Image (spheres, helix red, strand yellow):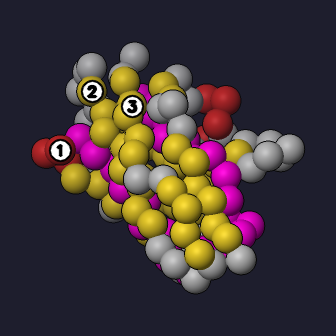
Amino acid sequence: QVQLAESGGGLVQAGGSLRLSCTASGRTVGSDAMAWFRQAPGKAREFVAAIYWSGPNIYYTDSVRGRFAISRDNPKNTVYLEMDSLTPEDTAVYYCAAQRDLAVWNIRKGWLYESWGQGTQVTVSS
């Protein structure tokens, strides 16, 4: 199992930006899918974005497409989530997740991810 450490959450005003980081350690992650999920109070966890350590494909949920950008730095074993034009509806705990050899059609399914970070709080004030 890979260990994931998130950072970068905080309090920001609506319209502002934040960048989350997720650094992986413990094993090689070359074939992993890396994803960001979030969970707002009283709501179910939802998929936000995903990327593979290898290859160009990137996936977003519709509500963040055009505002959020997921990227990776392979030498640093780090995945980023750049969040722009934040709204109060983006307020949630954001989690990084990793799963080895995850098929593309399963990439939004949180229950298939084996490794999770501790979560980082993002709060957007109106």
Residue bearing the label numbered 3? 4
Find residue 20 and report its horizontal and vertical position in percent: 42, 55
Residue bearing the label numbered 2? 25
Q: CA distance from mark 2 to mark 3?
A: 7 Å
- Determine whether the residue tagged by mark 3 lies in a helix, strand or loop: strand
Find residue 67 and report its horizontal and vertical position in percent: 54, 77
| Amino acid type assigned to the residue bearing label 1 in the image | Lys
Of the numbered discs 2 and 1, the one sitting upstream in the chain is 2
Q: Nearer the viewer, residue 52 or 49?
A: 49
**Residue at image coords 67%, 70%:** 125
Q: Is residue 83 magenta?
A: yes
| Amino acid type assigned to the residue bearing label 3 in the image | Leu
Residue bearing the label numbered 1? 76
Question: Magenta residues?
Answer: 77-104
Q: In the rendered view, would you say 3 is above or below 39?
A: above
Is 84 situated left or right of 26 in this image?
right
Q: In the rendered view, would you say 73 is above or below 98?
A: below
